[in-house]
Amino acid sequence: METDSMESSTRSNQNDEIHHNGGTFHFSSTKSHSSAAASPTVVTNIVGPTATSVYELLECPVCTCSMYPPIHQCHNGHTLCSTCKVRVHNRCPTCRQELGDIRCLALEKVAESLELPCKFYNLGCPEIFPYYSKLKHESLCNFRPYGCPYAGSECGVVGDIPFLVSHLRDDHKVDMHAGSTFNHRYVKSNPREVENATWMLTVFQCFGQYFCLHFEAFQLGMGPVYMAFLRFMGDEEEARSYSYSLEVGGSGRKLTWEGTPRSIRDSHRKVRDSNDGLIIQRNMALFFSGGDRKELKLRVTGKIWKEQHSPDSGLFMPNLSS
C-alpha cells in the first residue's frame, strides 16, 4: 500500500499568542477557543427603532436575506426577493396567491433612503453605508471572518485567526510548529502514481503571526508535479510585510524559490493554480531523491522573515529573527 509521510523540524524562541475579541462567528477569547459551529448573523441594530422595523420589512420571508431590486409583491402586498420568486414557483409564500409581475416600488424607494452598518459591525467594522452599497463593502470588508485554509476537504468553518488555528489543530490534526525556519522531508513510496491533490499542511507561528506551509503532488498536463507554497493567516496587505524562501536539492544540485506569502483570503486552489510557489517536475524530484528512483525522498527547507522599512533609505530590510 502506498504511503506518504512527512518529517519536520523547526527552530524558534518565540511563542506569541494572538487574541481577537469574540463575535457572532467562530471567534476566540483570551481564555479558550471554541470549536462549535455558529451561523453568521446580520446586524439589525441600526439607527433607531423605526429604521430597524423598516429593515425587517426588507427581509425576504423565504431566504431571510435583505431584498434588493427588483422586489416583488403579491396582490395582497406580501413581498419577497427575485431569487425566491422563482423558487416558490410564482406563488406567494404567505397567502399562496399568484405573484404575477408586480414590483414593490415604494419599498425599493424606502431602501434607497436607508443607511446601515456593515453586518460585521459586531466584529469591529465601524462603517455605515447606503443600503445599496452595503453588499459590495461586505464582500471586501477587512473585518469579515476568514475561511478555513485546510485544503483536503470542503471545510465551511469560518472565524478569526486564533479560532482557525485551534480548529486546524484539533479538528484537522494539522502539525503545529513555532519557528521561522523549517526542514521537511517528504517521502512517497511510488512516485509513478500521483493522485491529484495529494497534499500536506503544516502551520508555523513566528513574528506573532501564523503561516500555512502547503506541500502537494498533483497532475499538471501529462505529468505529475510537486509544489510547495506558503500562505499567511491574515489579510493581503499585511502578508506583503513578509517574505519566504524554499529550497529543495540533492546530488549536489538545488532548486530555490523566494516570494511573498499569499493571504488565506485567496483560496488554496487559486494559489495552487497560479503556480505561485516552488514547483518541482517529477524527473527533477526523482533526481533529487537519488538511489534507484523507485522512491521519492524530497527534503524541503525554508525560512520566513519580516521586511523592515528603513526610514532613511526608503528600502525594506529583512528581519530574520522570529
Image (cartoon, rainbow, N blue to C red):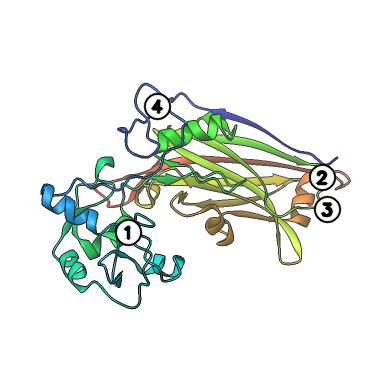
Disc on the earlier residue, 2 or 1: 1
Bin the neighbour count of mark 4 within 10 Å (Cα to Cα): few under 14, some 14-19, many 20 and up: few
Quick check: 245 above or below 175? below
User: Viewer-proximal residue, 257 or 202?
Assistant: 202
Quadrant assignment, res 176:
top right
Residue hosting label 2? 290
- Which labelled disc corresponds to residue 60? 1
Mark in the foreground, 3 or 2: 3
Q: CA distance from mark 2 to mark 1?
A: 63 Å
Disc on the earlier residue, 4 or 1: 4
Total number of numbered discs in the rendering: 4
Quick check: 170 above or below 246? above
Measured as percent of width and height from the top left, residue 283 is found at: 78, 56
- Which labelled disc corresponds to residue 192? 3
Q: Amino acid at mark 3?
A: Arg
Q: Residue furthest right?
A: 292
Residue hosting label 4? 16
Disc on the earlier residue, 3 or 2: 3
